[in-house]
Protein backbone atom coordinates (compact mmCIF):
# COMPACT_ATOMS: atom_id res chain seq x y z
CA UNK A 1 0.00 0.00 0.00
CA UNK A 2 1.32 3.52 -0.81
CA UNK A 3 1.61 5.96 2.06
CA UNK A 4 -1.56 5.76 4.15
CA UNK A 5 -3.90 8.72 4.28
CA UNK A 6 -4.58 7.86 7.91
CA UNK A 7 -2.32 5.92 10.21
CA UNK A 8 -3.39 5.21 13.77
CA UNK A 9 -0.90 3.63 16.15
CA UNK A 10 -1.43 2.44 19.71
CA UNK A 11 -4.35 4.79 20.18
CA UNK A 12 -5.69 4.73 23.72
CA UNK A 13 -8.38 7.11 24.92
CA UNK A 14 -9.74 7.39 28.45
CA UNK A 15 -12.81 9.14 29.77
CA UNK A 16 -11.44 10.63 32.93
CA UNK A 17 -13.86 10.63 35.85
CA UNK A 18 -13.82 11.19 39.60
CA UNK A 19 -14.55 7.56 40.25
CA UNK A 20 -11.64 6.54 37.99
CA UNK A 21 -10.74 6.46 34.33
CA UNK A 22 -12.70 4.49 31.79
CA UNK A 23 -10.61 3.22 28.91
CA UNK A 24 -12.90 3.62 25.88
CA UNK A 25 -10.22 2.87 23.24
CA UNK A 26 -7.42 0.40 23.91
CA UNK A 27 -4.24 0.34 21.93
CA UNK A 28 -5.90 0.56 18.52
CA UNK A 29 -3.77 0.56 15.33
CA UNK A 30 -4.89 0.61 11.69
CA UNK A 31 -4.16 2.35 8.39
CA UNK A 32 -6.43 3.66 5.64
CA UNK A 33 -4.88 3.83 2.17
CA UNK A 34 -5.52 6.41 -0.58
CA UNK A 35 -8.99 5.91 -1.99
CA UNK A 36 -9.78 3.14 0.46
CA UNK A 37 -13.23 2.68 1.98
CA UNK A 38 -12.58 1.40 5.51
CA UNK A 39 -15.42 0.33 7.78
CA UNK A 40 -15.32 0.29 11.56
CA UNK A 41 -17.99 -1.92 13.10
CA UNK A 42 -18.91 -3.07 16.58
CA UNK A 43 -21.75 -2.81 19.03
CA UNK A 44 -22.86 0.39 20.69
CA UNK A 45 -20.33 1.78 23.15
CA UNK A 46 -17.28 -0.05 21.77
CA UNK A 47 -15.42 3.20 21.06
CA UNK A 48 -16.01 3.85 17.33
CA UNK A 49 -17.18 7.46 17.68
CA UNK A 50 -14.47 8.21 20.22
CA UNK A 51 -11.89 7.27 17.56
CA UNK A 52 -13.73 9.29 14.88
CA UNK A 53 -13.66 12.44 16.99
CA UNK A 54 -10.03 11.98 18.01
CA UNK A 55 -8.81 11.85 14.38
CA UNK A 56 -9.51 15.55 13.86
CA UNK A 57 -9.03 16.28 17.55
CA UNK A 58 -12.69 17.08 18.03
CA UNK A 59 -12.78 15.03 21.22
CA UNK A 60 -13.61 17.04 24.33
CA UNK A 61 -12.85 16.55 28.00
CA UNK A 62 -13.32 14.21 29.80
CA UNK A 63 -11.90 12.30 26.82
CA UNK A 64 -8.14 12.15 27.08
CA UNK A 65 -5.80 10.69 24.46
CA UNK A 66 -3.08 8.73 26.25
CA UNK A 67 0.63 9.38 25.74
CA UNK A 68 2.17 7.03 23.22
CA UNK A 69 -0.87 7.27 20.91
CA UNK A 70 -0.18 8.40 17.34
CA UNK A 71 -2.57 9.70 14.70
CA UNK A 72 -0.97 10.57 11.35
CA UNK A 73 -2.92 12.19 8.50
CA UNK A 74 -0.91 12.29 5.29
CA UNK A 75 2.17 11.54 7.42
CA UNK A 76 1.60 14.52 9.77
CA UNK A 77 1.17 13.98 13.47
CA UNK A 78 -2.29 15.34 14.30
CA UNK A 79 -1.68 15.20 18.03
CA UNK A 80 1.13 17.75 17.87
CA UNK A 81 -0.50 20.30 15.51
CA UNK A 82 -0.88 23.88 16.75
CA UNK A 83 -4.37 25.50 16.57
CA UNK A 84 -3.78 27.11 13.15
CA UNK A 85 -2.54 23.86 11.62
CA UNK A 86 -5.45 22.03 13.21
CA UNK A 87 -7.95 24.45 11.65
CA UNK A 88 -6.29 23.83 8.28
CA UNK A 89 -6.52 20.08 8.79
CA UNK A 90 -10.25 20.14 9.50
CA UNK A 91 -12.39 20.33 6.37
CA UNK A 92 -9.43 20.64 3.99
CA UNK A 93 -7.86 17.31 4.84
CA UNK A 94 -10.37 15.55 7.04
CA UNK A 95 -14.12 16.18 6.83
CA UNK A 96 -16.77 14.60 9.03
CA UNK A 97 -20.39 13.66 8.38
CA UNK A 98 -22.49 12.61 11.38
CA UNK A 99 -25.82 10.90 11.74
CA UNK A 100 -27.43 14.19 12.64
CA UNK A 101 -25.43 16.14 10.04
CA UNK A 102 -28.53 17.00 8.04
CA UNK A 103 -29.81 18.86 11.08
CA UNK A 104 -26.57 20.80 11.36
CA UNK A 105 -27.51 22.94 8.36
CA UNK A 106 -28.50 26.43 9.47
CA UNK A 107 -32.31 26.66 8.97
CA UNK A 108 -32.28 30.39 8.13
CA UNK A 109 -29.58 30.30 5.46
CA UNK A 110 -29.91 29.14 1.86
CA UNK A 111 -27.85 26.18 0.71
CA UNK A 112 -25.74 28.53 -1.36
CA UNK A 113 -24.84 30.63 1.69
CA UNK A 114 -23.92 27.53 3.70
CA UNK A 115 -21.48 26.52 0.97
CA UNK A 116 -20.14 30.08 0.94
CA UNK A 117 -19.54 30.06 4.70
CA UNK A 118 -17.31 27.01 4.39
CA UNK A 119 -15.63 27.90 1.09
CA UNK A 120 -14.85 31.51 2.01
CA UNK A 121 -13.59 30.63 5.51
CA UNK A 122 -11.47 27.64 4.58
CA UNK A 123 -10.45 28.36 0.99
CA UNK A 124 -10.94 32.14 0.62
CA UNK A 125 -13.34 31.76 -2.31
CA UNK A 126 -15.33 34.75 -3.57
CA UNK A 127 -19.12 34.61 -3.63
CA UNK A 128 -19.16 33.93 -7.37
CA UNK A 129 -16.47 31.24 -7.22
CA UNK A 130 -18.23 29.66 -4.26
CA UNK A 131 -21.54 29.57 -6.14
CA UNK A 132 -19.88 27.86 -9.07
CA UNK A 133 -18.19 25.28 -6.86
CA UNK A 134 -21.42 24.71 -4.90
CA UNK A 135 -23.40 24.11 -8.10
CA UNK A 136 -20.80 21.61 -9.27
CA UNK A 137 -20.81 19.78 -5.92
CA UNK A 138 -24.61 19.63 -5.73
CA UNK A 139 -24.75 18.08 -9.20
CA UNK A 140 -22.22 15.49 -8.03
CA UNK A 141 -24.55 14.34 -5.27
CA UNK A 142 -27.53 14.34 -7.65
CA UNK A 143 -29.23 17.59 -6.63
CA UNK A 144 -30.05 20.12 -9.37
CA UNK A 145 -28.05 23.35 -9.04
CA UNK A 146 -31.25 25.40 -8.90
CA UNK A 147 -31.77 24.12 -5.36
CA UNK A 148 -28.91 26.35 -4.24
CA UNK A 149 -31.45 29.02 -3.40
CA UNK A 150 -33.49 26.61 -1.23
CA UNK A 151 -33.60 26.62 2.55
CA UNK A 152 -32.98 23.33 4.38
CA UNK A 153 -36.68 22.83 5.29
CA UNK A 154 -37.51 22.81 1.57
CA UNK A 155 -35.42 19.65 1.08
CA UNK A 156 -36.07 16.06 2.17
CA UNK A 157 -33.91 14.45 4.86
CA UNK A 158 -31.98 12.47 2.24
CA UNK A 159 -31.33 15.61 0.20
CA UNK A 160 -30.17 17.52 3.28
CA UNK A 161 -27.74 14.74 4.12
CA UNK A 162 -26.46 14.80 0.52
CA UNK A 163 -26.01 18.58 0.79
CA UNK A 164 -23.86 18.08 3.90
CA UNK A 165 -21.81 15.46 2.07
CA UNK A 166 -21.43 17.85 -0.89
CA UNK A 167 -20.25 20.64 1.43
CA UNK A 168 -17.76 18.24 3.03
CA UNK A 169 -16.42 17.20 -0.38
CA UNK A 170 -16.24 20.75 -1.72
CA UNK A 171 -12.79 21.33 -0.19
CA UNK A 172 -11.48 18.05 -1.65
CA UNK A 173 -10.50 16.44 1.67
CA UNK A 174 -8.25 13.40 1.57
CA UNK A 175 -10.34 11.61 4.17
CA UNK A 176 -14.03 11.76 4.91
CA UNK A 177 -15.19 10.30 8.21
CA UNK A 178 -18.79 9.19 8.26
CA UNK A 179 -20.22 8.23 11.63
CA UNK A 180 -23.60 6.55 11.11
CA UNK A 181 -24.19 9.01 8.23
CA UNK A 182 -27.41 7.48 7.00
CA UNK A 183 -28.90 5.88 10.09
CA UNK A 184 -31.65 8.49 10.39
CA UNK A 185 -32.78 7.86 6.80
CA UNK A 186 -34.98 5.14 5.37
CA UNK A 187 -33.17 2.14 3.91
CA UNK A 188 -33.74 3.01 0.25
CA UNK A 189 -32.33 6.52 0.67
CA UNK A 190 -29.56 5.10 2.84
CA UNK A 191 -28.46 2.71 0.12
CA UNK A 192 -28.70 5.35 -2.59
CA UNK A 193 -26.47 7.73 -0.65
CA UNK A 194 -23.87 5.07 0.10
CA UNK A 195 -23.79 3.95 -3.51
CA UNK A 196 -23.25 7.56 -4.52
CA UNK A 197 -20.39 7.99 -2.05
CA UNK A 198 -18.91 4.77 -3.35
CA UNK A 199 -18.91 6.10 -6.93
CA UNK A 200 -17.69 9.57 -5.93
CA UNK A 201 -14.84 8.01 -4.03
CA UNK A 202 -13.76 6.25 -7.22
CA UNK A 203 -14.05 9.47 -9.20
CA UNK A 204 -12.51 11.92 -6.72
CA UNK A 205 -10.07 9.60 -4.96
CA UNK A 206 -10.80 10.44 -1.33
CA UNK A 207 -10.63 7.80 1.41
CA UNK A 208 -13.51 6.98 3.72
CA UNK A 209 -13.72 5.91 7.35
CA UNK A 210 -17.25 4.60 7.63
CA UNK A 211 -18.74 3.83 11.02
CA UNK A 212 -21.92 1.89 11.56
CA UNK A 213 -23.36 -0.85 13.73
CA UNK A 214 -24.87 -2.29 10.54
CA UNK A 215 -22.30 -4.89 9.54
CA UNK A 216 -24.38 -6.21 6.64
CA UNK A 217 -24.51 -2.77 5.03
CA UNK A 218 -20.84 -2.19 5.75
CA UNK A 219 -19.72 -5.36 3.99
CA UNK A 220 -21.38 -4.17 0.81
CA UNK A 221 -19.63 -0.81 0.62
CA UNK A 222 -16.23 -1.27 2.31
CA UNK A 223 -12.87 -2.47 1.01
CA UNK A 224 -11.67 -3.49 4.46
CA UNK A 225 -13.38 -3.68 7.82
CA UNK A 226 -12.15 -3.44 11.38
CA UNK A 227 -14.22 -5.06 14.13
CA UNK A 228 -14.18 -3.44 17.56
CA UNK A 229 -15.03 -5.01 20.89
CA UNK A 230 -14.92 -3.09 24.15
CA UNK A 231 -12.39 -0.54 22.93
CA UNK A 232 -10.14 -3.02 21.13
CA UNK A 233 -9.76 -3.71 17.44
CA UNK A 234 -10.11 -7.48 17.41
CA UNK A 235 -10.06 -8.20 13.66
CA UNK A 236 -9.17 -6.32 10.46
CA UNK A 237 -9.67 -7.92 7.08
CA UNK A 238 -10.97 -7.50 3.54
CA UNK A 239 -14.73 -6.94 3.62
CA UNK A 240 -15.40 -10.18 1.76
CA UNK A 241 -13.32 -12.16 4.24
CA UNK A 242 -15.13 -10.57 7.18
CA UNK A 243 -18.28 -12.02 5.66
CA UNK A 244 -17.13 -15.34 4.25
CA UNK A 245 -14.38 -16.20 6.70
CA UNK A 246 -14.75 -14.32 9.99
CA UNK A 247 -11.84 -15.21 12.26
CA UNK A 248 -12.62 -13.73 15.62
CA UNK A 249 -15.33 -15.33 17.75
CA UNK A 250 -16.91 -11.91 18.22
CA UNK A 251 -17.15 -11.30 14.44
CA UNK A 252 -18.91 -14.65 14.12
CA UNK A 253 -21.22 -13.63 16.93
CA UNK A 254 -22.03 -10.36 15.17
CA UNK A 255 -23.08 -12.26 12.04
CA UNK A 256 -25.08 -14.74 14.07
CA UNK A 257 -26.99 -11.86 15.63
CA UNK A 258 -28.24 -10.57 12.26
CA UNK A 259 -31.78 -11.87 11.66
CA UNK A 260 -32.21 -14.14 8.68
CA UNK A 261 -35.33 -14.03 6.57
CA UNK A 262 -35.28 -17.50 5.07
CA UNK A 263 -32.88 -19.57 7.07
CA UNK A 264 -29.98 -18.60 4.79
CA UNK A 265 -27.74 -15.61 5.21
CA UNK A 266 -29.57 -12.43 4.38
CA UNK A 267 -26.76 -10.85 2.43
CA UNK A 268 -25.44 -13.83 0.50
CA UNK A 269 -25.87 -12.34 -2.94
CA UNK A 270 -25.27 -8.76 -2.00
CA UNK A 271 -21.89 -9.19 -0.31
CA UNK A 272 -19.08 -8.63 -2.74
N1 LIG B 1 -18.35 12.09 27.55
C1 LIG B 1 -18.19 10.83 28.00
N2 LIG B 1 -17.93 10.58 29.30
C2 LIG B 1 -17.74 9.33 29.75
N3 LIG B 1 -17.81 8.23 29.00
C3 LIG B 1 -18.10 8.39 27.70
C4 LIG B 1 -18.30 9.70 27.11
N4 LIG B 1 -18.55 9.54 25.80
C5 LIG B 1 -18.52 8.21 25.56
N5 LIG B 1 -18.25 7.52 26.70
C6 LIG B 1 -18.12 6.06 26.83
O1 LIG B 1 -17.06 5.61 26.01
C7 LIG B 1 -17.41 4.38 25.39
C8 LIG B 1 -17.24 4.48 23.90
O2 LIG B 1 -18.24 5.38 23.39
P1 LIG B 1 -18.40 5.65 21.83
O3 LIG B 1 -19.47 6.69 21.68
O4 LIG B 1 -17.08 5.93 21.26
O5 LIG B 1 -18.91 4.25 21.31
P2 LIG B 1 -19.54 3.87 19.90
O6 LIG B 1 -18.96 2.56 19.55
O7 LIG B 1 -19.36 4.97 18.94
O8 LIG B 1 -21.06 3.71 20.28
P3 LIG B 1 -22.37 4.09 19.41
O9 LIG B 1 -22.39 3.12 18.27
O10 LIG B 1 -23.48 3.88 20.39
O11 LIG B 1 -22.21 5.51 19.00
C9 LIG B 1 -18.83 4.04 25.84
O12 LIG B 1 -18.76 3.13 26.90
C10 LIG B 1 -19.37 5.37 26.31
O13 LIG B 1 -20.32 5.18 27.35
Image (cartoon, rainbow, N blue to C red):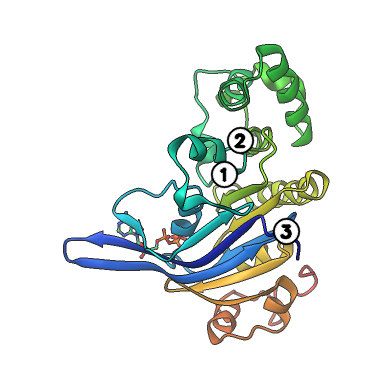
Q: Secondary structure at mark 2?
A: helix
Question: What is the CA distance from the residue labelled 2 to the residue labelled 1?
Answer: 7 Å
Between 265 and 19, the residue placed more toward the observer is 19
Query: Ligand 1: does it lie within 8 Å of the C-beta at label 1?
Result: no
Helix, strand or loop under label 3:
loop
In the rendered structure, the answer to whether residue 192 lies left or right of residue 44 reads: right
Q: Is residue 267 visible?
A: no
- To which residue does mark 3 refer? 36
Instruction: Work out whether residue 28 or residue 74 is closer to the camera in this orientation and state it.
Output: 74
The residue that label 1 is drawn on is 97
Q: Local crowd at mark 2 within 10 Å, few (<14), some, or many (≥20)?
A: many
Q: Earlier in the sequence, mark 3 or mark 1?
A: 3
* Coordinates of residue 169 in the picture (x, y in percent): 68, 37
Q: Residues within 10 Å of mark 1 (few under 14, many from 20)?
A: many
Single out the mark in the foreground, 3 or 2.
Answer: 3
In the foreground, 189 or 221: 221
Q: Which mark is residue 164?
A: 2
Image coordinates for residue 258, horizontal then vertical, percent = 59, 74
Say whether mark 3 is within 8 Å of ligand 1: no
Q: Residues within 10 Å of mark 3 (few under 14, many from 20)?
A: many
Is residue 150 shown above or below 21?
Answer: above
User: Quadrant location of ligand 1?
Assistant: bottom left
Q: Is residue 69 above or below residue 190?
A: below
How far apart marks 3 and 1 lie (CA) works out to: 17 Å
- Residue 148: give x, y in percent of width and height: 68, 20
Q: Are marks 2 and 1 in contact (CB under 8 Å)?
A: yes
Mark 3 vs 2, N-terminal side: 3
**x 72%, y 78%: residue:** 241
Amino acid sequence: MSEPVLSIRNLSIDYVGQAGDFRAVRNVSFDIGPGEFFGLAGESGCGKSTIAFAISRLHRPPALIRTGSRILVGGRDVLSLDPAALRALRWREVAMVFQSAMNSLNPVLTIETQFYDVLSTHAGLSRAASRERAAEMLELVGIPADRLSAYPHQLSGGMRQRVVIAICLSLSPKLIIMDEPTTALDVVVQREILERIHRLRQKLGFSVLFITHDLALMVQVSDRIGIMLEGELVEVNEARAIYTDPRHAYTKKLWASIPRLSGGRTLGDAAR
